[in-house]
Amino acid sequence: MDQLRRRMFRLLLLFSGSLLLLSGILFWIQIGSGGVYSSRKVDLVRRSVLQRGEGLVLDTGRGQFTDRAGVPLTGETVPALVVFPLRIDDDEGRSKLQRIAGIIGKDAGSLVEWSYQLQQPEVWPNRSKPLRLSEAQIAEIQGLGFPGAQVMPLTVRYSEHPIARHLLGFIGEQPSRIEQQYGKALSQGYVNEHTPIGLAGLEKQFDRFLLPVSARKVTVYTDGKKQPLEGLGTRLSSEANPYYPLRVETTLSYSIQKEVEETLRRHNLKEGAVVVLDAHHADVVAMASWPEFHPLRVDPKSTAWNNRAVQAIAPGSIFKTVVAAAALESGAVHPDDTFDCHGSLGKYGFTCWLKHGHGRLTFREAFAESCNIAFALAMQRMDAATLLKTAERLGLPGKNGWSESGPGGFVQLDGEEAGRIFAEQANRQDGGVLAQTSIGQRDVRMNPLQAANMIVTLLNEGKAVQPRVVERIRYRTGGVMQLFPEQKLNSELKPISKKTANTILDWMGDVVEYGTGASLRQSTWRLAGKSGTAETGQGTVHQWFVGYGPTDKPRYAVAVVVRNVPENARNYSLALFRDIMDLLAEVESDKS
Ligand SMILES: [Zn+2]
């Protein structure tokens, strides 16, 4: 019997995991004592006046998220201890509970006391943070054959250390939105006003696909005296829906996401974001935002849960990428044109970051050295409209994430903030405004996703696409329910020329070869990119680095931003960028 129970438990774990599920299985699995559940007994229960005990939901049936290979990102199933308020207050019950307390290493008094106040079956010590039983503990508890406390597979939405927290978001109760959005499901009883729904992130955006369809419950069958019914005991049930819950398959790589997060933790990052895009399709391979938060303990007053990977902030000199492309594309500047930097423009209080100036340098060198004066002078040869035209082709201003066209169309990413070049009220003829704009200050805003996607656009010789974070939604059976095809970004615009795109990519190589990114020369791959330090106006700066690697056969575009650090702090984004590229290089070398 014990062996059978163990096997059943394993079977159930398999069923309730996110692995391929066999279709059409109505499973009633008996965990308590007694024989196999027969149809005769179902009828018996239905017709009888005997009490059907309270149910405990072990899996709400809400749809789950996976990475691109089907690795679960939510919905971990753990073996948990469930106590039933059933025959636990006699001598035998008390002694069994005391033995279980010994097995799980808790003082017996607290488990017994906790059990006595239960009106409903409950998970020890609570549903959102169950005690995870070891194999040995499971065997010992099952060996007791005690109906009052049993091991059950419990699906927890978020583990103790969930990954991709900001991207996935969190769920919670919001009765007003249920009424508004799910009136029909509410009236049909699929949801009630306390059903948790997605409040942020992908949980919110994909909520309509995730609504619980078939819950898995454990029910105790008792007689009027709360004694378990002979032959029925406790049972697990799941409704027979072969297609639900759905699985939302993201484009993330579980292992890369995890390692990116570990890198940020190791660097003790306070505030910032990282976006890793696949260099060919702009699919999001990893997306991390800091500081961390826990989806089970969300403080609504804190901003920790905001996804900084899609928040638009001043880009500083990474925006010189756009200015250089506009200058070359329009013919306003030739790559070999020279500029003189004496550290100051001589007006608008505009200076170079290198106090005594760079001296005479070509436009190409000015890009590698990130010379402010050269870029302000280059901008003087263009007008605002020329800059704007190229910026639009590179995905700025506006938003980049995958969305259905038209008003009210489906949007994959929650909270993406639009990028911007000029504020509406800004005077676009003003020399000071243009100089500040040329170095990514003043009104210029970009989000990290956009910054990484700009690199992908250059790598694709100007063809811009909308980064996806979800590629498909699958039925429980594995079949595809919904596809999100690759979509062009700004498809009505003519892309920038291949020549300009390739020139800028080469110049990004110079940045690492001899420019501001020279510390990246020690990395595993040969890398290329652009640095940026943006003043926030509050005495702090945002440090950026965006780029790609390896240079000979680009596989990833990465944007790193470290937010709100002291002005003279050492450049931290470079070290992060390098470690992330090194871990990507390791992943790729493991593949081949
Ligand atoms: Zn300079």
Image: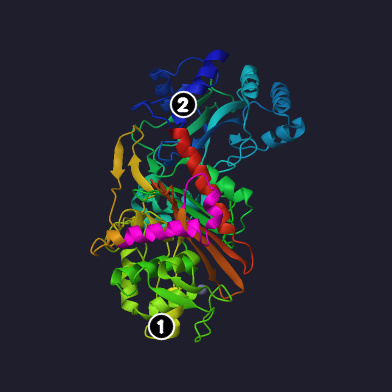
Task: Name the foreground residue: 97 vs 545.
Answer: 545
Give how far across and how far down residue 399 sits, in percent: 37, 63
Whether residue 436 can be seen here: yes
**Which residue carries the number 1 mark?**
426
Whether residue 319 can be seen here: no
Task: Name the foreground residue: 525 vs 165.
Answer: 525
On screen, residue 340 versus residue 213, left or right, reads right
Q: Earlier in the sequence, mark 1 or mark 2?
A: 2
| Placement of the N terminus among the 4 image quadrants | top right
**Which secondary structure class fits the magenta region best?**
helix
Q: Residue at coordinates 38% horizontally, 57% vertically from top-left?
A: 505
Q: Badge 2: few (under 14), some or many (20 or more) residues near its Cα, within 10 Å?
A: some
Residue 42, above or below 505: above
Residue 58, above or below 410: above
On screen, residue 569 versus residue 170, left or right, reads right
Q: Is residue 510 magenta?
A: yes
**Which residue carries the number 2 mark?**
14
